[in-house]
Amino acid sequence: MQATDSAVRREITVNATPERAFFIFTEGFDTWWPRSHKVGPTDLAKAVIDPDRMQWYEVGVDGTTTDWGAILTYDPPNRVTLEWRIGGTWQCETDPALFSEVDVTFTPEGDATRVTLEHQHLDRHTAADALKGAVGSEGGWNGLLQRYSEAVD
Amino acid sequence: MTNGMDALGDPTRRAIFERLARGPTAVGEIAKDVPVSRPAVSQHLKVLKQAGLVTDRAEGTKRLYQLDPRGVGQLRDYFDAFWMQALTAFKEAVENPT
């Protein structure tokens, strides 16, 4: 795990061209985004990265759209940068000073592509959100982290 | 010792806590942004300190309050684990289309 005080950085190498990797990340966003991670009040019908609107957002099963933030950079097949307006606990932030950023780059490595993701400016999110769940609650952050590490391992 | 969840159960304390997310702040400045008096703010800060959510330091004649950085560290750890899971799912979608 690499992290600075306010950012996380993760890399993964995929056996595909940058064009395909970029395509799946963006136009194929709904095919891989974890279904449980959404903001709106209903279940997730579709998660969308939309370069026409320059927004990324969810569509609920009730048809409502909830924006997750602007697309700041859209440069196929090299880079996409997303503004993260949904805070530390998947609730909408409205203060731009509290938005973070997710910067994704796609770098060819032989026949494969190295995808590097940096989630920056995490310190801007209300840390209260992080602690509300974490402190003393199994159903909160600590429980969630445990399930993630089990899923990853 | 006050429990952190109990400390944040009070909406005014949550507002003070969220105000501190913007950086170290003196009591007088916090009091401008919440609908309670300065003494009440001080009392809430005491509770937040006892719960380990907030720390303070002296700067000249002022006392500055700030969030305990371990809180932000937990947020970072959460996103680190989340993105690992999300990128693993992404790799699967790239390499094994259904």
Image (cartoon, rainbow, N blue to C red):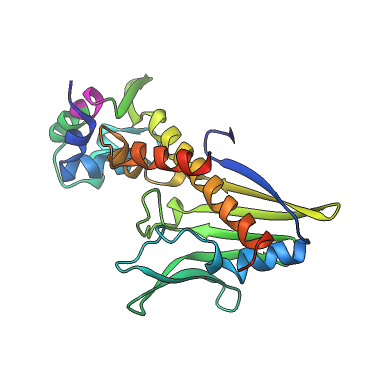
Query: Is the magenta region chiefly helix, strand or loop?
Result: helix
Relative height, residue A151 to residue A112 (above, below): above
> Magenta includes B50?
yes
In the rendered image, the quadrant that contains the C terminus of chain B is bottom right
Instruction: Give whichever of B85, B79 is nearer the camera.
Output: B85
Relative height, residue A44 to residue B48 (above, below): below
* Residue A96 visible in the displayed image: yes
Which residue is at 21% across, 38% downward?
B8
* Magenta stretch in the rendered image: B46-51
Displayed quadrant of residue B55: top left
Left or right: residue A24 versus residue A32 is right
Instruction: Give whichever of A92, A112 is nearer the camera.
Output: A112
Percent position (x, y) of residue A13? Answer: 71, 49
Percent position (x, y) of residue A81? Answer: 62, 59
Left or right: residue B39 versus residue B82 is left
In the rendered image, the quadrant that contains the N terminus of chain B is top left
Which residue is at 42% across, 46% downward?
A125
Instruction: Give whichever of B13, A47 is nearer the camera.
Output: A47
Relative height, residue B75 to residue B61 (above, below): below
Percent position (x, y) of residue A47? Answer: 48, 69
> Magenta includes A59?
no
Which residue is at 47% across, 37% downward?
B77
Percent position (x, y) of residue B70? Answer: 40, 29
Which residue is at 67% across, 47% downward?
A12
* Residue B63 visible in the displayed image: no
Q: How many marks?
A: 0
